[in-house]
Amino acid sequence: MKDLASCRVLIVDDVKTNVDLLVNALRGDYQLSVALDGESALRIARATQPDLVLLDIMMPGIDGYEVCRRLKADATTRDTPVVFLSALEETQSKTRGFELGAADYITKPFEMLEVKARVRALLRAKAYQEAARELLLSELRIAHEIQMSVVPHDFTPWAADGRLDVFARLKPARDIGGDLYDVFALDRRRVAVAIGDVSGKGIPASLLMMMTTTLVRSLLRLSGQPGTVLAAVNEELAADNPSCMFVTLFCGVLDLDTGVLTYASGGHLPPVHINRRARLVEFESTGTAVGLLPDITFNHGQVRLVPGDTLLLYTDGVTESFDAAGTCFGDERLLTLLTSELPATAEATVEAVLEGVGRFARGVDQADDIAMLALRFHGAVTAEKTLALHATGSDVARALDVLRAFGVENHVDGETIGNLAVALDEILSNVVRHGYKDDPAGVIGIALRCRADVVTIAVRDRAPAWDPKAIPAPAFDRPLEDRPEGGMGVPLVRSLVDTVEYARRGNENHVLLTKRRAAI
Amino acid sequence: MPLSVRVDRGSPTSGAGIVHVTLDGSLDSTTAPALERELAAALEGDVRALVLDLQRLVFLSSAGVRVIAATRKTLAARGGKVLMINMQPPVAKVFEIIKALPELLAFKDIQELDDYLAAMQRKVREGG
């Protein structure tokens, strides 16, 4: 708690003798500032942020009432207690002072002991209040970290696996919230997904969110049956629920071999299902919200994802974002945003929606929690070609030729292969020149893979570690000859392909390039 | 994919001090060093302009952009220019991403280049 001796008291009075009296009495206990009129009082208050203001009422220029009104209107001085010191004894004057937000009103001539006692009591109350607020804020910060840690954030294993592109974001309106998502592998073939929204916001909602997330994850691991999981979660939550809180919850299990998503929905918004031509696929959704009534059964639904399909699971914080005029973002805007130009990756999908909502709300504070989970289904590898190279120019040229032939064999459109070839040349020439320093003994492994909707190139080498993402954006605005040597290649790669993933595994660098191919 | 380079000092466009170079194939990290040597040899003497015909250039990566940028610098030091014609879309895309085009003069075709050169010569005559 703040030491009272370090508190600053601002004394405002146009009569010098009053000021002297107060300064003498308080000098030993606090830091002091003095103002002899209203305007300078406001200026000093803004500059020094006092902990308390002793304020005379009748002064030339703006009077004490007006000073108080302006202090209370300014966010930086709003919480500073104001004590009026005045010869005006009428109840009306006092009442007016309190109505303007004063903490106390002392009439002149005053007893100095009483002034000191009141100042001390107010400063102590303010210090307590601040300490309590800081404690709460610090606990909320920690709670925020704990809440964030229960939902998955690392989606790189999915990128390495290649069958499913995954990205999710949780964005509570306050420090903590009631939205949740989850995505994890049940086994080699099946992926469990969930999204939910607890009624209400803040601490109560976040407690139920933690409980629901944990329950859903354990139960999905146990049964793998979304409807059964929802029924079991419902029993747990409805059993003892005096405050009638509930969760809208969507659970699904996706079979990566067949693309079939088996799901159950407890009153949650149906996901947006978009095919690779950015057309919307109708989504049935059934069931009541979870936790309100016992003994509810939840039906299973099924949809089939075709490679290239995107599924966006989201909470109503997205569609119920408001702009300054009170207009709601709404389903239509969400669908238009996603179907006008389907983002290339799961991450780009989530970011595009967040960006769209932010642009729509334009500075209006986010009112509700937001959760989004995007899945882009790539399915199985349809063609694969691996080759081993040495770090020489002729082997790099050979790799580009193999890539072009691979594209022709698998009917990949020329533009996709052309872009991938430039990207591959950049990556390989970097490895040869900067990684292996042109040592032909250096080895490089390449795997070219086709899936129905994407082509990927995996490159691995044993040169020293480097991270394409750590290379700064080049000075594209500078004349060509002033640009740092070798800085152009990696940004070019990023522009030409949809994703660039880098990982250091053991003594190997792994780079994975993914590019969406044109629909056949 | 290889790169073939044809250097022509006596083509129809070539006035005094103009070298016409036709690129065919792939200008990538493997083929760029050889082009750099050929261009250096071609630009010896009082060459003031290099016309690069990219009609048949199907592939360009940043190694190639570097060679062209270096050539531009060499020529600029003696008041000369690199002039590119017949650029194909995949190659143009690379130039666009790297934002190299404002400094490199690109023309749709030989007609547009001739008009440009004629205008330049007029300007020099009138100025002199």
Image: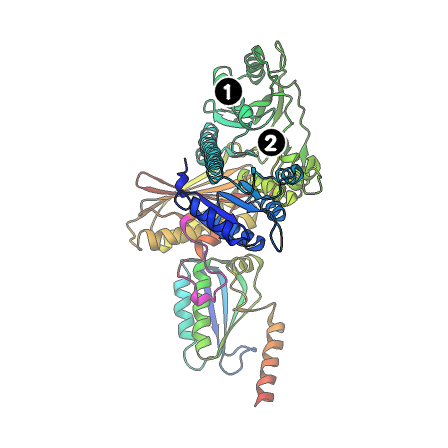
- Do tag 1 and tag 2 residues touch (Cβ < 8 Å)? no
Please, what secondary structure does the residue beneath circle 2 have? strand
Q: Main secondary structure of the magenta part?
A: loop
Q: Nearer the viewer, residue A196 or B7?
A: A196
Please give the chain letter of the residue carrying mark 2.
A
- A250 within the magenta span: no
User: Would residue A51 be visible to someone looking at this image?
Assistant: yes
Residue located at (57% from left, 86% from top): B124
Residue A287 location (% of width, % of height): 65, 18
Residue range (magenta): A470-484
Residue located at (62% from left, 72% from top): B112
Residue located at (54% from left, 65% from top): B101
Within 10 Å of disc 1 (Cα), the crowding (few <14, some 14-19, many 20+) is few
Q: Any mark on residue A64, and which?
A: none
Where A172 falls versus A80 (above or below)? above
State the quadrant of the N terminus of chain A.
Answer: top left
Q: Nearer the viewer, residue A255 or A156?
A: A156
Residue A484 location (% of width, % of height): 40, 61
Q: Any mark on residue A211, and which?
A: 1
Q: Are marks 1 and 2 on the same chain?
A: yes
